[in-house]
Image (spheres, rainbow, N blue to C red):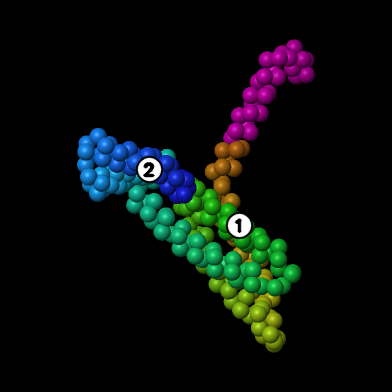
Amino acid sequence: MNPIVSLIIRSFVAVPVTVLTGVVSFFILGQNILPSFAYAIAGGAVVHVILSLMMNRRFLKKHQLTMKEFRYIRKNLAEANKKIRRLNKSLFSIREISSVKQRIDIVRITKKIQKLALKEPKRFYQAEPFYFSHLDSVVELTEKYSFLASQPKKNLEINQSLIETRRTLNEMTRVLENDLYRVISDDVEDLNFEIDVAKHTIKKQKDSKFPDENRWLK
């Protein structure tokens, strides 16, 4: 679940409990204002923690992950976020019109993979080459390309390096596309299976509606 949505839900429950606990302590149990306030805060905090544990447990069960696995994935996704920010910064600092489409494709693919892994953490394992190799490579390439492209005067060697880097980035874009396909490969297989089932159902329905016509066609 989205952390912000999760926080809103917990707060939505914990705040009324906090108020109710304070009112009960002060007006019904006859506690002084400070103890009532302390009980109210403690009651809200306990509810908040319990809800957090329950929601985390439900999330892990849904995605078939242990807490250790989830922490490992979350740590790597947090590091990937930093790398993607560096990538975006270097890509958008490049002023060349000719490479705009290439840069947009790189940003789109990297953000899509990260978004899928954040939403469904288990997909991280399908994207391990992206997180442990390909993302690092494309960040390093774009940062060096951005640095060389920003030089006011370029000699033959710099221009040759820029050409070679553009060519390599084209190849890396295809590598990233393969990473994205690997992440969604199960969805593609599921969709193909559903299509086959739907086709079989349609054919069966037609056969039951027009048995004589189908026999004649045979």
Point out residue 147 in the picture as x, y percentages from the top left corner. 61, 79
Q: Which residues are magenta?
A: 193-218
Residue at image position (52%, 60%) is 130
Q: Say what secondary structure mark 1 lies in.
A: helix
- The amino acid beneath tag 1 is Ile
Question: Of circles 1 and 2, which is in front?
Answer: 2
Assign the C terminus to one quadrant of the image: top right
Q: Residues within 10 Å of mark 2 (few under 14, many from 20)?
A: some
Point out residue 7 in the picture as x, y percentages from the top left corner. 42, 47
Q: What whole-number distance in Å separates the C-alpha atoms at marks 1 and 2? A: 40 Å
Residue 157: quadrant of the picture: bottom right
Residue at image position (64%, 68%) is 92
Residue 166: quadrant of the picture: bottom right
Label total for image: 2
Which residue is under mark 2? 15
Dominant SS of magenta comes to helix
| Residue 122 seen in the figure | no
